[in-house]
Amino acid sequence: DTHVAPLHARSTCERLAAAGKQVELIEVAAGEDSKSLTVLEGVLRKLASVRFGRDSAVLAIGGGVVTDLAGFAAASYLRGVAFYACPTSLLAMVDAGVGGKTGVNLPEGKNLVGAFWQPRAVVADVATLVSLPPRQFREGAVELFKHGLLDDEFLLGAPEDTRFAPNGDSSTLEEYVARSVAVKAKVVAADEREAGSRAHLNLGHTLAHAIEAASEHSISHGEAVAYGLQYAALLGLGRGWFDFTGAAQRLLSWLEPAPLPCRSFDELLPYMLRDKKNLAARMRFVLLRHEATPVLVDDVDDDEQRRAWGQLLEVVS
């Protein structure tokens, strides 16, 4: 995007050109609005105008918006060309740039159009994190924290680790990123196209995607997922399942997210009903039955949802 291009992309293009490659740099506006069909069309038409063939590759350099958009462009152009990801944000390194999910948003909801298209390689250089504002770094850490809830308790200590910072110790950052990626890679390897267990990676995301859409993406993905994790914790607690409300609340306190876009559950419900995990018009949630034991449930009734929403409002008020 226009923020990352002068920091990392242009120098990369120069080195590729010096190695004899034909290179076209395509820049898009920074922000979630670039994950749209309109912007995707512009990228595809640019590839067509310079007559890129099936021997070409799309290289994404940037955050999650860019890796999602570029990956979908690679999956779509000529019915599929090679894709490489060089994530430069923490969110993209530990989540968006890994796993082969690509796509764009519709006004009706997030990530409703896309394709599964695996990158040939993902190159995450933690040195690029120094260019991130601290807040954006913390927002990316939310997905890393989620992976800790799913399968690696070590990752839950990130918010309290003073070495875990954009300009932190490189070996520490590498360990956190590598362990987080390992959690996601293990899940994706077992269920690439989300026929079953890959849906567990959506812990906290049913509410999160609704919050993002209702706020017109003024609330970041990381902030929304932090709210969503607390909501999932409260839903599970109401059933007497694993209690991670304290951990989720510590994450919220560390992140200090923007205020919720609304206090009415009814405003969020239409977006939740369009969530891509839903089947047969039944809303599905990922919850933790036991520690590091996620389950996908479709029997969370309206009373449970509204009670947990009211409790979430109390937590963040």
Image (cartoon, rainbow, N blue to C red):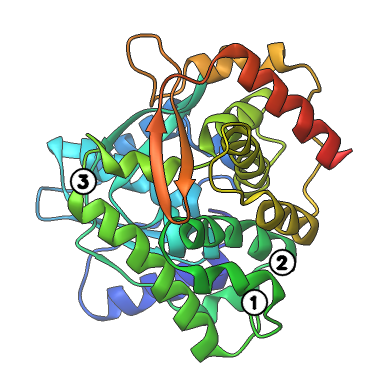
Q: Is residue 62 visible from the viewing direction of this image?
A: no
Q: Nearer the viewer, mark 2 or mark 3?
A: 3
Q: Residue at x 82, y 41 (%)?
A: 315
Horizontal side, residue 66 vs residue 259: left or right: left
Q: Residue at x 28, y 42 (%)?
A: 197
Does 261 appear above or below 294? above
Q: Is residue 194 visible from the viewing direction of this image?
A: yes
Q: Amino acid at mark 2?
A: Pro
Depth check: give the residue in front, 208 or 290: 290
Depth check: give the residue in front, 240 or 66: 240
Circle on res. 166: 1
N-term mark: 2 or 1: 2
Q: Residue at x 29, y 60 (%)?
A: 185
Q: Which residue is mark 2?
A: 133
The Cα atoms of the two marked residues, 2 and 1, are separated by 8 Å
**How far across and down, in percent of the image, does residue 135 sit?**
73, 61
Q: Are marks 2 and 1 in contact (CB under 8 Å)?
A: yes
Circle on res. 192: 3
Horizontal side, residue 258 vs residue 161: left or right: right
Count the labels in the image: 3
| Quadrant of the image containing the C terminus | top right
Q: Amino acid at mark 3?
A: Glu
Q: Amino acid at mark 1?
A: Pro
The Cα atoms of the two marked residues, 2 and 3, are separated by 32 Å
